[in-house]
Image (cartoon, rainbow, N blue to C red):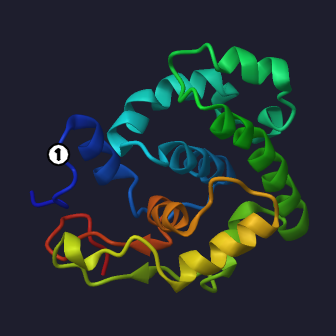
Amino acid sequence: MIRCSWAKGELEIDYHDHQWCVENHDDHYLYEMLVLEGMQAGLSWTLILKRREGMRRAFDGFDYRVIATYDDAKIAALMLNPDVIRNRLKLKSLVSNAQAFLRVQEEYGSFDQYIWSFTNRQRIIHAVHGPEDVPTRNALSDQISKDLKKRGFKFVGSVIVYSYLQAIGVIDDHMEQCFCKQS
């Protein structure tokens, strides 16, 4: 089987084969991926995948309703947990992003309705022949990043948002020869 060249280790291959660029409309998953992409800022995706289960346990199963109520004591406890990314700003963003996520749900009915509205619920499938064909950002990620920031989200710069759009399947950047490529 031919797959995208970045998927090398067991965790990367599993993520690539079953989640990356796979269309998803579940708000719980959409929040989890928003957290993971934000946590990755400045770090490797492999590290995030290695810590994912630990973060799932520490972050109440990525339940944004619970996370929205985290206080300073909870953040302090998380700072001591070796299973998470122990960056105070990133941990505090869990809370502000959960709160903003809930506001978006209130306004749009679901975060899914909000995020997919930017493409009129259409997937964007790029013709990728090699890693050099995959941008780190584009006009869409710039637009969504700006809107998310306006709504109070943190760690949602355009590069993070582009990766997020890949993670939830809005954008399909699988290489043309990859067995996961949608047509």
- The answer to whether one can see residue 144 in this image is yes
**Residue drawn where x is 58% and y is 15% of the image:** 81
Q: Amino acid at mark 1?
A: Lys
Label 1 Cα neighbours within 10 Å, binned few <14 / some 14-19 / many ≥20: few
Q: Nearer the viewer, residue 11 or 1?
A: 11
Q: How many marks?
A: 1
70 left or right of 118? right
Picture coordinates of residue 5 (x, y %)? 16, 58
Q: Residue at x 78, y 62 (%)?
A: 110
Q: Does residue 113 appear anywhere in the picture? A: no
Residue denoted by label 1: 8
Pinpoint residue 105: horizontal percent, then vertical percent: 83, 60
Residue under the point 41% across and 42% down: 43
Quadrant of the image for the N terminus? bottom left
Q: Quadrant of the C terminus?
A: bottom left
Foreground of the two, 60 or 148: 148
Instruction: State whether residue 140 is above or below residue 54.
Output: below
- Compared across the picture, whether 115 is left or right of 141 comes to right
Q: Is residue 39 above or below residue 78?
A: below
Q: Quadrant of residue 135?
A: bottom left
Residue 171 against residue 69 in the figure, above or below: below
Q: Farthest residue toward the left?
A: 1
Q: Position of residue 157 (x, y in %)?
A: 59, 64
Where residue 118 appears, x then y in whole percent?
65, 81
Please indicate whether residue 126 sits to the left or right of residue 164 in the image: left
State which quadrant residue 56 falls in.
top right
The secondary structure type at the circle numbered 1 is: loop
Between 110 and 154, the one lying in front of the other is 154
